[in-house]
Image (tube, helix red, strand yellow):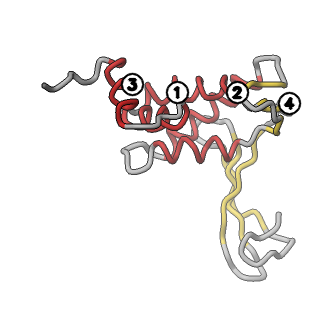
Amino acid sequence: MRCPFCGHDDTQVKDSRPTEDNSAIRRRRFCPACSSRFTTFERVQLRDLIITKKNGQRVPFDRDKLVRSISIACRKRKVDEERIERVVNSIQRRLESSGESDIPSTSIGEMVMEALQALDPVAYVRYASVYKNFREARDFEEFVESLGGIEKSA
């Protein structure tokens, strides 16, 4: 494993253990060249997933992109990284076990929406605002009203 700090090719594993949900192996590594420490995660990949976007473009599934988008929605909310990891692991497992290798991006968006609705209501609305392409404040209001979360003020 290459050191992310200095690029040295030969790093040492100091500690290995499974993650809390046993979906990956967490490895603490040490670089003898620059003395930096860093963590890597090893996961099983059952199949290569291809995501078909709305414009027809096909791209490989990017787990890190999924983590980033959920993390952005949860920013400054009381949602710890482990819960986000569990959500991402669950979505990835569902995709890999679906039997399909070509997945529409809308399927992933719906899975994220479903997970965030259960995880944090503010993160759910934040994600929905991007996923459903809200253009103005009225879009937010209509969405939240559809949830039964607010009443109109006179």
Label 2 environment density (alpha carbons within 10 Å; few <14, some 14–19, many ≥20): some
Left or right side of 132 for 58: right
Q: Residue at x 48, y 32 (%)?
A: 128
Earlier residue among tags 1 and 4 = 4
Q: Secondary structure at mark 4?
A: loop
Q: What's the residue at 59%, 23% (across, down)? A: 110
Q: How many angstroms separate mark 3 from mark 1 (CA)?
A: 13 Å
Q: Amino acid at mark 4?
A: Arg
Q: Is residue 81 above or below residue 135?
A: below
At numbered mark 1, what does the secondary structure look like: helix, strand or loop? helix
Q: Are marks 3 and 1 in contact (CB under 8 Å)?
A: no
Pick whichever, 4 or 115, lies toward us: 115
Q: Mark on residue 47?
A: 4
Position of 110 with respect to 23 (left or right) is left
- Callout in the foreground (1, 2): 1
Considering only order in the chain, which callout, 3 or 4, is on the residue closer to the N terminus? 4
- For numbered disc 3, what is the local secondary structure? helix
Which is in the foreground here, disc 3 or disc 1?
A: 3
Q: In which quarter of the view is residue 79 placed? A: top left
Element at label 2: helix
Q: Which residue is mark 1?
A: 113
Residue mark closest to the camera, 2 vs 3: 3
Residue under pointer 2: 93
- State the CA–CA distance, disc 1 to disc 2: 16 Å
Q: Quadrant of residue 30?
A: bottom right
The circle on residue 143 is 3
Q: Amino acid at mark 2?
A: Arg
Tag 1: amino acid: Met
- The alpha-carbon separation of the residues under discs 2 and 4 comes to 10 Å
Q: Position of residue 13 (x, y in %)?
A: 75, 63
Q: Earlier in the sequence, mark 2 or mark 3?
A: 2
